[in-house]
Every structure is written in C-alpha cells, then in structure tokens.
Image (cartoon, rainbow, N blue to C red):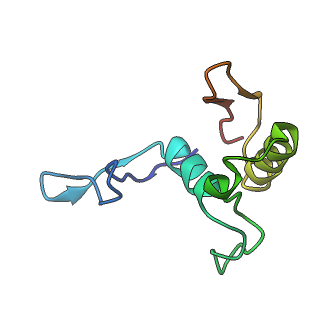
Amino acid sequence: MTGDILLTPEGDFQIENGDFVIGDATLQHQQDILISHKGEYKEAPEIGVGILSEVNNENPRAILAQIKRNFEYDGMQVNTLRVADNGNLIVDAPYK
C-alpha cells in the first residue's frame, strides 16, 4: 500500500518535526473498517462492520464473513482471518 497520514492511538494526526507522519496505514484502515457502520463513509457507503455492535453475537462465522467482504472490497488480500481462543481477532490482510 502506498503511504498515508498516520494517526496516534487517540486518533490525532502523528506529527514529527512540524509535519504529518506518512507510513503504512493498513492496520489503521482495518480498525476503521471494523469500527465503522455501513453508511458512515459517503464515498463508500457499503463499507463498515460495526464490530462493537456485534460483541455478543453468537455467530462468529457470519461476522468473519462480513469482515472478509469488507477488507476485500477495500482492496486487501485476506490471508488469515480468525478468532483466537482468547477472543482476539487474528488478521493477515495486506493491500494487494
């Protein structure tokens, strides 16, 4: 993926020497897709998983399928996508 403006964990712009920090923002984009709901992005209204609304969903396969569709729609190659035994989401999905 080409470089993008990086954000801090709090969502602020990363700034070094008075300028924006540019770098690989793949993880940032994945987080944005997971947290956002469909319709939140005017330019791509079909993007968004709304993962926080799915916390108690008892069908992880449906959620994983939705995540995979969203990542692929955004141009990622999904190599690994699963829920670990501890409940963490394991993702290997770089941009093509």
Q: Write the residue at 72% across / 64% down.
A: 47
Residue 88 screen position, x and y as percent:
60, 29
Q: Nearer the viewer, residue 12 or 60?
A: 60
Q: Write the residue at 72% across / 70% down.
A: 38
Using residue 64 as the reference point, say whether residue 14 is left or right of it: left
Q: Nearer the viewer, residue 40 or 20?
A: 40
Q: Nearer the viewer, residue 65 or 60?
A: 60
Residue 85 screen position, x and y as percent:
68, 18
Residue 79 screen position, x and y as percent:
77, 28
Using residue 64 as the reference point, say whether residue 92 is left or right of it: left
Q: How many marks?
A: 0
Q: Nearer the viewer, residue 8 or 95?
A: 8
Does residue 96 lie above or below 91 as drawn? below
Q: The C terminus appears in which quarter of the rendering?
A: top right
Q: Write the residue at 77% across / 35% down.
A: 78
Q: The N terminus appears in which quarter of the rendering?
A: top right
Using residue 23 as the reference point, say whether residue 43 is left or right of it: right
| Most distant residue in the top direction | 85
Does residue 81 lie above or below 67 as drawn? above
Using residue 67 as the reference point, say whether residue 52 is left or right of it: left
Residue 83 screen position, x and y as percent:
71, 28
Does residue 19 lie above or below 90 as drawn? below
| Most distant residue in the bottom direction | 42
Q: Write the residue at 38% across / 51% down.
A: 6
